[in-house]
Image: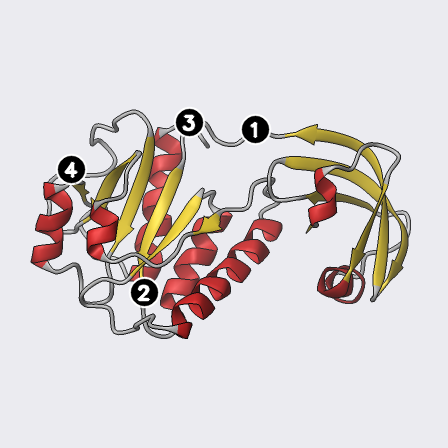
Amino acid sequence: MVLHFVHESAEGATPGDVVVLTGSEAHHAASVRRVREGESVTLTDGRGAWLTGSVTSADPKRVEVRVDARENRPAPERRVLLAQALAKGDRDELAVQAATELGIDGLIPWQAARCVSRWQGPKAEKGRARWQTIVREAAKQAHRAWIPEVEAAATTAGLAAHTGATTVVLDPWTEAPITTMDLPAGDLILVVGPEGGIAPEEIEQLTHAGAILARLGDSVLRTSTAGPAALAVLNARLGRW
């Protein structure tokens, strides 16, 4: 299996250049993944650059990769974002990890009315940074050339005011299945509620702003699985899979 790493210096690297991994990335490559001299690897800057190369030296503090080839992979023409309600424990983090592996293009932490977890003050930036770390690691695992960005935490009012995309609210009580619903052109935002569900007044606020309601089958999924399940359906419907 070809190992994949993320490094900012991949942005401007071309064939013949040597990219040097240091810090946690070098430790992960040499000590955790056990990469060795002569092994083939891929590198990205997380913004579309895709390098293939071979390891010329491997040490826990410094790993050098000689670039053999480069391509620039375009960003998706149609983005799908996940507005994931904050959840207790690690359930929201599980959703973020799985959605990233499945190809989500951006994430919005949602402070819904019924969220038990609250991101307030310094905790908001700490939580966002934690999600971004999870996204980065999941993107590496999935060998992605583009790493999704985690936006600042949004209230329901902020989510309703989000422009440039069609909002699809996952609601197990609506009649329209996501498998057959009409998908407008342009970007999409999947909205997943917290453990206690989305409050009726939030449903009203979002639909008043133009959101569409859709359900996933007959079962009620956990907040950690609803988003990834819906994304899998959209990946197939949009021809991404």
Question: Sequence order check: which comes first, mark 1 or mark 2?
Answer: 1
The reply, left or right, for residue 232 in relation to residue 27 is left
The reply, left or right, for residue 56 in relation to residue 90 is right
**Above or below: residue 138 compared with residue 69:** below
Determine the residue positioned at 69% across, 48% down: 8
For label 2, the residue is 86
Question: Sequence order check: which comes first, mark 3 or mark 4?
Answer: 4
On the image, which quarter does residue 163 sit in? Answer: top left
For label 4, the residue is 210
Determine the residue positioned at 73% across, 42% down: 10
Question: Sequence order check: which comes first, mark 2 or mark 3?
Answer: 2
Question: Sequence order check: which comes first, mark 3 or mark 1?
Answer: 1
**Above or below: residue 124 compared with residue 174:** below
* Residue 15: numbered disc: none
Q: How crowded is mark 2: few (under 14 residues within 10 Å), some or many (20 or more)?
A: many
* Residue 74: numbered disc: 1
Whether residue 134 is visible to the viewer of this picture, yes or no, is: yes
For label 3, the residue is 239
**Amino acid under label 4?**
Gly
